[in-house]
Image (cartoon, rainbow, N blue to C red):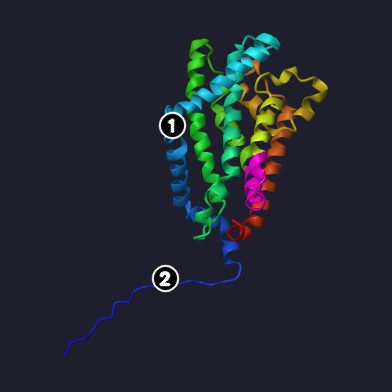
């Protein structure tokens, strides 16, 4: 007489519970981390696909802007630099965070529309889509940073010790773009007009931010108000890290820029989460 042994195998259990997705939303971001990597890598791989010079665009665009600003503000308008810092270096040190911010904002604000097919097919935290676009902007930043190193060698300009704090300001630039980017990409699902607004906002912001000039040229009584633009504090922080004491941080203004960045990040996340349930229906 033989005895049969039954092998017990566990089967996956699907739990249907009201509000479960909401309660586990932020934990799901970690669970879907592989999707984040896939989306980020896809964006990077197609970034300069079928272009003649490829990733060199990440250097050419900020370099040409730096040349124009150096001629207009440094040679024609004769605005002062910070100490004995070469004007071209002053401008390019600001072009880096601005390009990081503007690229991240532009990509994240149109990210949901660009991934409409993916959103309608499967569940995952939609927050992953705009967050993944930050990686592409960061890669462009790293490529442009090589150009900055070359310029510092050319001008024989040694970096300041506080250059080690630069990652803090890189994160601030990304956070400054993520907050508005989340809000705008959510609005863009319902109101497609916003895709025309972003290029104008980015172009306008380039000229009102201290990219082509030092923020010290702003009259003292207006400097705090000027820092309502969160990128002012980020740009000043970059220059302080790279150029040292010749470009000191205006601390009250920096704290204000930090507060504005935190506010827009909170607003962007809250509005994105509020509208997220309707994305699949509207897109």
Q: What stretch is highlighted in magenta?
A: 179-197
Tell me the residue at 64%/26% (across/down).
235
Q: Total marks drawn?
A: 2
Q: Quickly name the residue at label 2.
A: 12
| Residue toward you, 135 or 58 | 58
Residue 273, picture quadrant? bottom right
Give the main secondary structure, helix, strand or loop, of the magenta stretch: helix
Q: Where is residue 110 in the image (x, y as percent from the top left)?
A: 58, 44
Q: Rate crowding at label 2 as few (under 14), some (14 to 19) or many (20 or more) other CA atoms within 10 Å.
A: few
| Of pointers 1 and 2, the one earlier in the residue sequence | 2
Q: What element carries label 2?
A: loop
Q: Residue 51 carries which label?
A: 1
Q: Quadrant of the C terminus?
A: bottom right
Q: Quadrant of residue 95?
A: top right
In this rendered view, identify the residue nearer to me: 174 or 237.
174
Q: Is residue 69 magenta?
A: no
Toward the left, the furthest residue is 1
Label 1, residues with CA under 10 Å away: few <14, some 14-19, many ≥20: few
Which residue corresponds to the image point at 72% horizontal and 32% vertical from the top-left?
A: 229
């Amino acid at each position: 007489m033989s005895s049969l042994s039954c092998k017990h195998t566990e089967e996956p259990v699907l739990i249907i519970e009201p509000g479960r997705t909401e309660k586990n939303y932020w934990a799901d971001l970690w669970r879907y981390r592989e999707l984040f990597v896939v989306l980020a890598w896809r964006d990077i791989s197609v970034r300069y696909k079928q272009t003649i010079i490829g990733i060199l665009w990440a250097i050419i665009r900020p370099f040409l802007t730096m040349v124009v600003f150096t001629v207009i503000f440094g040679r024609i308008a004769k605005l002062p630099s910070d100490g004995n810092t070469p004007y071209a270096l002053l401008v390019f040190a600001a072009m880096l965070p601005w390009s990081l911010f503007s690229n991240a904002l532009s990509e994240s604000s149109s990210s949901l529309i660009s991934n409409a097919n993916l959103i309608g097919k499967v569940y995952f935290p939609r927050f992953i889509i705009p967050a993944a676009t930050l990686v592409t902007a960061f890669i462009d930043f790293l490529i442009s940073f090589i150009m900055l190193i070359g310029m510092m060698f050319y001008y024989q300009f040694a970096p300041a010790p506080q250059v080690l704090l630069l990652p803090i300001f890189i994160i601030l630039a990304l956070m400054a773009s993520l907050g508005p980017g989340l809000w705008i990409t959510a609005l863009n699902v319902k109101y497609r007009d916003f895709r025309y607004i972003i290029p104008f906002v980015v172009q306008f912001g380039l000229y009102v931010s201290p990219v082509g000039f030092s923020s010290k040229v702003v009259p003292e009584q207006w400097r705090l108000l000027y820092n309502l633009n969160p990128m002012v504090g980020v740009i000043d922080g970059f220059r302080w890290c790279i150029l040292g004491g010749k470009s000191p941080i205006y601390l009250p203004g920096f704290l204000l820029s930090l507060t504005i960045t935190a506010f827009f990040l909170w607003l962007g996340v809250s509005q994105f989460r509020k509208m997220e349930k309707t994305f699949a229906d509207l897109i």
